[in-house]
């Protein structure tokens, strides 16, 4: 008898520890069609130690046994410290600390080396899901070019094509998105490769903001560890608009949802490039001579919110009417 069960997508996840990155991880642990093979933590929008610790606690909470590695490669343009300490808060959430966790003997190679090893040893090509900067992947491509053939698809959250960026830093013109701005050279290196890229820019990810209604919906299913964690991580995002002028959106969660429900977004092929230097560094620009990227262009926001709730608050109430 022929087995007609669809093959689970083998995924290596590279994130940078912000609340939305951890929500994306939580989604991945619930997808039957995702075979999570390894997790790298990039020290960008986080303090790496707490972000790694929170990652491991989430895996323990959800019963997943997945190897992890923490990154050490620096970015050119650091995230504000006020944003990075969210990883401390996430790691201290009571739902993640219902028992003692030990990290003794768990240290291994840094994330860039570990990612190269995971790719090299993969029996079949894998998907690299990156919701943070592309630093580790760029290092792999530069120092181990043979891994390029081991990558089925790079799915990443980043860029801003036809909308303003979210970088507000002295000397920058505001056209870049932070994941690319943190390490523009890495983004340029990945774009200059031949790996298939599916990009989720601010053009679509800004259309799925965290709302009070969404966060409070998780309170109606309080007592379930999965939904308690999701609701707590959403609560950590409150105050972003008031302190930065920018709404906190589910940038990474939307990107991760593509692996389970690719129809949530509509895509088009765009030729583009990355600006690596100057006042526009990190900007993604349309360029007829650039490489072809499969780019998310529109999103069914209602369908995404239903998916988000249905996955992380199973059996709970739906999103209230607007």
Image (cartoon, rainbow, N blue to C red):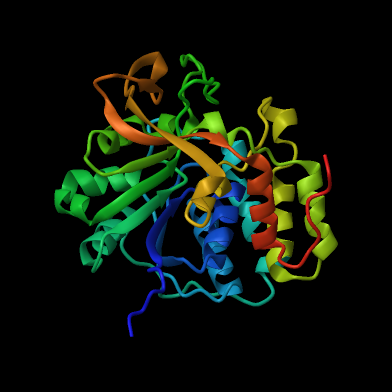
Q: Residue at x 52, y 23 (%)?
A: 165
| Horizontal relation, residue 228 to residue 42: left or right | right
Q: Quadrant of the N terminus?
A: bottom left
Q: Residue at x 73, y 56 (%)?
A: 232
How many marks the image carries: the answer is 0
Q: Is residue 273 above or below residue 200?
A: above
Q: Is residue 186 left or right of residue 237?
A: left
Residue 37 is at least partly visible in this image? no
Instruction: Pinpoint residue 70: horizontal percent, then vertical percent.
Output: 41, 57
Q: Position of residue 66 (x, y in %)?
A: 43, 70
Residue 271 figure quarter: top left
Q: Left or right? Give the position of 1 relative to 301.
A: left
Q: What residue is at 59 percent from the left and 48 percent from the top? A: 20
Q: Nearer the viewer, residue 223 or 196?
A: 196
Asked if residue 98 is positioned above or below residue 239 in the image, the reply reads below
Q: Residue furthest front?
A: 1
Question: Is 179 above or below relative to 151?
Answer: above
The location of residue 281, given as percent across then percent down, is 38, 21
| Residue at the extreme left of the image, as rendered | 146
Q: Is residue 162 visible?
A: yes
Residue at 34 percent across and 66 percent down: it is 108
Q: Where residue 226 sits: x, y (%)?
A: 68, 67
Instruction: Give the answer, above or below, for where 186 lies relative to 246.
Output: below
């Amino acid at each position: 008898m022929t087995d007609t069960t669809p093959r689970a997508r083998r995924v290596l996840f590279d994130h940078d520890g912000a609340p939305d990155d951890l929500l994306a991880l939580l989604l991945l642990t619930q997808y039957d069609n995702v075979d999570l093979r390894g997790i790298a933590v990039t020290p960008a929008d986080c303090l790496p130690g707490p972000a790694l610790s929170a990652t491991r606690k989430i895996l323990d909470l959800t019963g997943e046994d997945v190897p992890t590695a923490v990154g050490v490669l620096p970015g050119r343009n650091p995230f504000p410290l006020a944003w990075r300490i969210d990883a401390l808060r996430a790691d201290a959430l009571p739902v993640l600390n219902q028992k003692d966790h030990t990290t003794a003997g768990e240290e291994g190679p840094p994330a860039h080396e570990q990612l190269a090893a995971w790719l090299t040893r993969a029996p079949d090509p894998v998907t690299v899901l990156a919701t943070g900067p592309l630093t580790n992947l760029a290092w792999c491509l530069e120092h181990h070019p043979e891994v390029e053939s081991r990558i089925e698809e790079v799915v990443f959250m980043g860029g801003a094509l036809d909308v303003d960026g979210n970088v507000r830093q002295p000397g920058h013109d505001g056209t870049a998105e932070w994941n690319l701005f943190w390490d523009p050279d890495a983004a340029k290196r990945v774009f200059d490769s031949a790996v298939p890229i599916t990009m989720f820019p601010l053009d679509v990810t800004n259309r799925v903001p965290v709302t009070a209604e969404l966060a409070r919906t998780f309170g109606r299913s309080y007592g379930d560890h999965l939904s308690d964690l999701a609701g707590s991580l959403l609560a950590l995002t409150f105050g972003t608009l008031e302190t930065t002028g920018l709404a906190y959106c589910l940038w990474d969660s939307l990107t991760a949802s593509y692996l389970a429900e690719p129809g949530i977004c509509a895509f088009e092929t765009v030729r583009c490039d990355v600006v690596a230097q100057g006042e526009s560094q990190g900007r993604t620009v349309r360029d007829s001579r650039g490489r072809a990227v499969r780019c998310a262009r529109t999103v069914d926001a209602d369908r995404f919110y239903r998916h988000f709730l249905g996955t992380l608050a199973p059996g709970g109430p739906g999103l209230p009417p607007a």
